[in-house]
Amino acid sequence: MNKVPTSVLVGLLILAAVGLLAGLYSGLVRLGLLSFATPLVSPIAHGPLMINGFLGTLIGLERAAALEKKWAYAAPVFLAASTILLLIGFPGPSNGALILGSVGLTFVMGYLYYLQPKIYHLIMALGAFSLLVGNLLFVAGTPIYSIVGWWAAFPMLTIFGERLELNRIMRPPKQAQHIFTMLILGWLASLSITHIDHTIGWRIASLLLIGIAGWLIKYDIARKTIKSVEWTKYSAICLLTGYGWLILAGLFGLRYDLPTAGPIYDGLLHMLFVGFVFSMIFAHASVIIPSLSGKLVPWHTYFYLPLILLHSFLLIRIAGDMMGLHQVRIIGSYGNVAAIILFLGGIMYQLTKEIFSQKSESISTKTQS
């Protein structure tokens, strides 16, 4: 075993949180926040910070911890370094670290598939490869609208693979697993088609996305665990609502494909990244945080508040997009940021409370002895 100190894991986790907060701030700057002053973070950094600085670092860290190989931590370290370099004004070195981190993460995921050649590891490896493709295109100066599909594929395929792995208890038939894999491979192929014919490629991708969501709803254990309690029930609700957003995003894509900019572009991307991806983050936080910090996150009904706010304000944001009401869109955006911060704050509070509780018990035990 090549375990690293918990302090290193927590440090990288904090850097992932820095990427998240900087990305959220950058997103608000895009909407006009503090337009009277020079922003601390460029609005064009919103996508790279959220995908690489936050999700890349977090997922890379989680996979490295699971692999228990010290060299595997190079990927999240480079991705975190890319964030810091970008924030302090060194875009060139930041891009270099970005590519190194993406290559490292692709290698880690590929190595996991080599060790255990299962379908779910293959899907996650394809997710990391998608991140590498997206980042290579980004560094090459490709327009963002041509990149976002690849960037979205990274967290989405990672989640798809993890759900397939966790759902082994449901024992989906081999044929169903093959169908799931073919849907995902088809979805990736359709992303490639978007570089030839954007409209056709995205509409094929949207149709396949609906199929993927339908498969997950049918075979995910969340359908059973929603009858459970506390974190288990909460996670199931997050998962199923996230799959609902996937279907809605697919329907939007079939109707509008993915414009190069504008309100439909904004709405569709946030269905994927906020409606689906952040639902999945909320769903898995109670598992990921303990695996990295070594501390359980005690359950509290408070966590329903940020979940409700996340989806409610996303609906408001999309309504603003569809009706062309910029102020409504801004309200929805601020609400989404608030929901994410409230969730993160709740996690931090519960962790801190648990740590102090354990210390108090330890002191009490020593005193009694």
Image: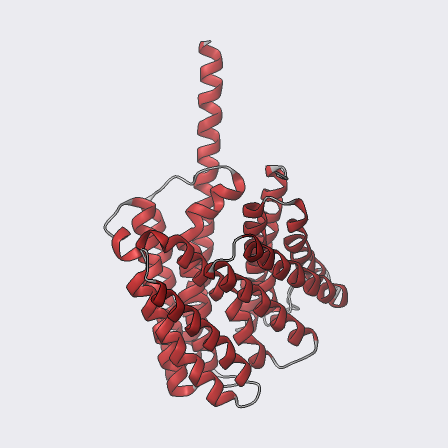
Residue 178 seen = yes
Q: Is residue 73 above or below residue 267?
A: above
Residue situated furthest left in the rendering? 227
> To which quarter of the image does residue 22 belong?
bottom right
Which residue occupies 48% across, 21% down?
Answer: 362
Q: Is residue 110 above or below residue 245?
A: above
Residue 46 seen = no
> To which quarter of the image does residue 172 belong?
bottom left
Horizontal side, residue 135 vs residue 25: left or right? right
- What colour-coding does the image apply? secondary structure
Q: Nearer the viewer, residue 304 or 65?
A: 65
Which residue occupies 32% across, 62% down?
Answer: 173
Q: Is residue 162 above or below residue 149?
A: above
Q: Is residue 364 above or below residue 161?
A: above
In percent of width and height, residue 354 lies at 44, 34
Residue situated furthest top in the rendering? 369
In percent of width and height, residue 191 lies at 52, 79
Which residue occupies 31% across, 61% down?
Answer: 219
Question: Which part of the image, by quadrant, shows the N terminus?
Answer: top right
Q: Nearer the viewer, residue 175 or 26?
A: 175
> To which quarter of the image does residue 272 belong?
bottom left
Which residue occupies 48% across, 37% down?
Answer: 295
In percent of width and height, residue 353 lies at 44, 35
In percent of width and height, residue 105 lies at 62, 59
Q: How many marks?
A: 0
